[in-house]
Amino acid sequence: MSDDQKLRVSKIRNGTVIDHIAGGQALNVLAILGIDGTDGEPISIVMNAPSDRLGTKDIIKVEGRELSEDELDVLSLVAPAASINIIREYDVVDKHVVHRPEEVIGVLECPNQHCITTESEPVDSHFEVLDEGVRCTYCDTIIREDLAAHILAG
Ligand code: CTP
């Protein structure tokens, strides 16, 4: 990491660092994770930092929380190159990449207003992940682009 990036935000003691997020996607990543800061945990966000590999990248540091691989895999929809670092006592104790999940449940909103998941029924949205997008398993509507615009609010 360049000195320039190190200066932007300090190391954390315990928690999760999500690195190599495509530049500009950090807020979408937080929305997918349902992290809005109201729990009071310290969160640092760097957006559009220079990156050799990605051009620009975003970084998120969530202190005091180790996010699970399953919840982090959903991020691959908006940040496929993201790398996850679990930090304990300042050391990186686990580092892994995100994998495209086979399905995403309760994260995206179906754009079909008549889909059972968007009516006032207690049914979570459920999308199958395809190469070209995601398909609602209830009404077969496919979202092909700008998945971030379909992230369910909190
Ligand atoms: N990090 C942190 N607090 C720590 C340790 C690491 O915030 N106590 C952050 C670093 O700033 C970096 C990420 O976790 O954004 C990964 O750390 P490290 O593996 O040390 O950095 P790199 O070798 O640059 O990672 P990579 O090879 O994944 O680019």
Image (tube, rainbow, N blue to C red):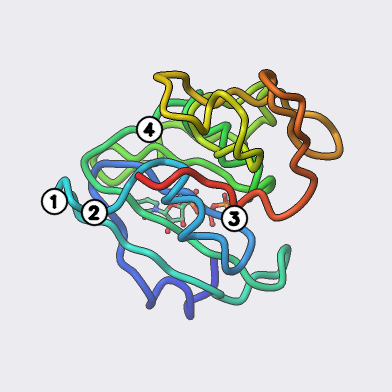
From the image, tell me which residue sits under label 4. 67
Give me the C-alpha separation between circle 4 and circle 3.
23 Å
Q: Amino acid at mark 1?
A: Gly
Q: Amino acid at mark 4?
A: Leu
Q: Nearer the viewer, residue 117 or 80?
A: 117
* Percent coordinates x, y for residue 127 in the rendering: 65, 26
Q: Give the SS element for disc 2.
A: loop
Residue 154's tag is none
Which badge, 2 or 4, comes first in the chain's sequence? 2
From the image, tell me which residue sits under label 1. 40
From the image, tell me which residue sits under label 3. 149
* Percent coordinates x, y for residue 42 in the rendering: 20, 55
* Percent coordinates x, y for residue 122 in the rendering: 40, 19
**Residue visible at 78% across and 36% down?**
142
Crowding at dot 2, Cα within 10 Å, few <14 / some 14-19 / many 20+, comes out as few
In the displayed structure image, the side of residue 72 where residue 23 appears, left or right: right
Give me the C-alpha separation between circle 3 and circle 1.
26 Å
Which badge, 3 or 1, comes first in the chain's sequence? 1
**Residue visible at 55% across and 39% down?**
109
Are dots 3 and 1 in contact, CB under 8 Å?
Answer: no
Q: Quadrant of residue 121?
A: top left
Which badge, 3 or 2, comes first in the chain's sequence? 2
From the image, tell me which residue sits under label 2. 37
Give me the C-alpha separation between circle 3 and circle 2.
20 Å
Are dots 1 and 2 in contact, CB under 8 Å?
Answer: yes
Q: Give the SS element for disc 1.
A: loop
Q: Amino acid at mark 3?
A: Ala
